[in-house]
Image: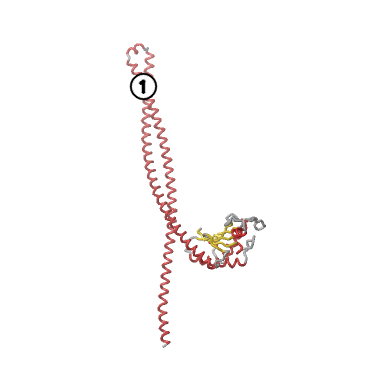
Amino acid sequence: MPRIRNKRHSGEHGEFWPGYVDMLSTILLVFTFLLSILMLAQYVVTYESNNKNIALRRLNSENLELKSMLSMEKQKYKGKHNEIKVLRAAISKSELEIQKYKDLAKISGLRAQLSSSKAFKLSSELNEQREISVKHSDRVVKLNQQLTDMKSQITKLSSALKVSEERTKKAQAQVVSLGARLDLELARKIEELKSYRSDFFGRLRTLLQNRRDIRIVGDRFIFQSEVLFPSGQAKMLPQGYATLDKLADAILKLSDEIPEEINWIIQVDGHTDIKPISSSNFPSNWELSTGRAISVVRYLISRGVPPQRLVAAGYGEFQPLSLERTLDGLRRNRRIEFKLTNR
């Protein structure tokens, strides 16, 4: 009887296991498909944004060129209009002169008194004024024609400018809409990164057993320098390596959990107290704080953390947590900070 029961149990497990594997395979395929769709959508949004910006710059350039041409044509139109005014004034003056001579010629008493030479002179001046009037009239006709052509050209330019401005407004509206979508996507990724940061800090707090010399302040995880380095040095203590091993394990687990589309980094910042330092290796606190941050980054890389996910920076004594010059205040300012952020 026991043998029969064992065979039955073995058969039940054998039937259950393939279904379990199929279910896991289906979930994995669905997850991979959704992740591919998200990456493709991000690429399309970025590509459209670049194209819209290029089109907007081209339309702005066309607008400037059309406005410049329109301004030049208006200046030419104004000059021709003024010239016509001058010519019309000259014609009016000539017509007045002609009318004056006609009035004089109509006076019969004056003709009798004028000698033949004066009459000839008066006739010559009259003919000359007529020729000037004819020339001015021809000039006015030509200028009127040019003025009409210029009005037509200005109308065309104004229409083209209006069309270009409408296209620019549409392109700007599209760019604004696309920018809003990008801002929403960026805000979503930042919020998602915040949730990972909370999990990361919680995991570190558990690993490091709530030590008083290691604490969380705001969005930063802070190690007192004495935990990792001897005074005035950038070479780590043996217990510092053990502490960073736990940190490296937490970062590696985090890198497996955060999606690829979130461009995250661990920023390592070195800080010193206000006491000056001057040695062959560290001429100032700038070099000491930077050297310590670089030492931490190098060790994390040696433990398998990807270099592209790490940043080292030194702040010297210029970003203190405490302004007190007491021993405790100086100790608080000597620190290494870790911040999970986006690039």
User: How is the structure coloured here?
Assistant: secondary structure
Q: Which residue is mark 1?
A: 96
Q: Is residue 193 left or right of residue 91?
A: right
Front position in the image: 48 or 308: 308
Front position in the image: 122 or 49: 49
Question: What amino acid is at disc 1?
Answer: Leu
Residue at horizontal 42%, vertical 38%?
A: 71
Q: Is residue 308 visible?
A: no
Residue 269 % position (x, y): 57, 59
Residue 33 % position (x, y): 42, 65
Residue 205 % position (x, y): 53, 66
User: Which quadrant of the figure has residue 140?
Assistant: top left
Q: Is residue 342 left or right of residue 130?
A: right
Residue at horizontal 40%, vertical 83%?
A: 8
Q: How many marks?
A: 1
Residue at horizontal 41%, vertical 72%?
A: 23
Where disc 1 sits, the SS reads helix
Question: Is 15 rendered above or below residue 283?
Answer: below
| Neighbours of disc 1 within 10 Å: few (<14), some (14-19), many (20+) | few
Question: Is 295 rendered above or below residue 144?
Answer: below
Q: Residue furthest right?
A: 280
Residue 262 % position (x, y): 48, 61
Q: Is residue 223 visible?
A: yes
**Quadrant position of the N terminus in the picture:** bottom left
Front position in the image: 84 or 170: 170
Q: Is residue 284 left or right of residue 185?
A: right
User: Which quadrant of the figure has residue 43?
Assistant: bottom left
Q: Residue furthest bottom?
A: 1
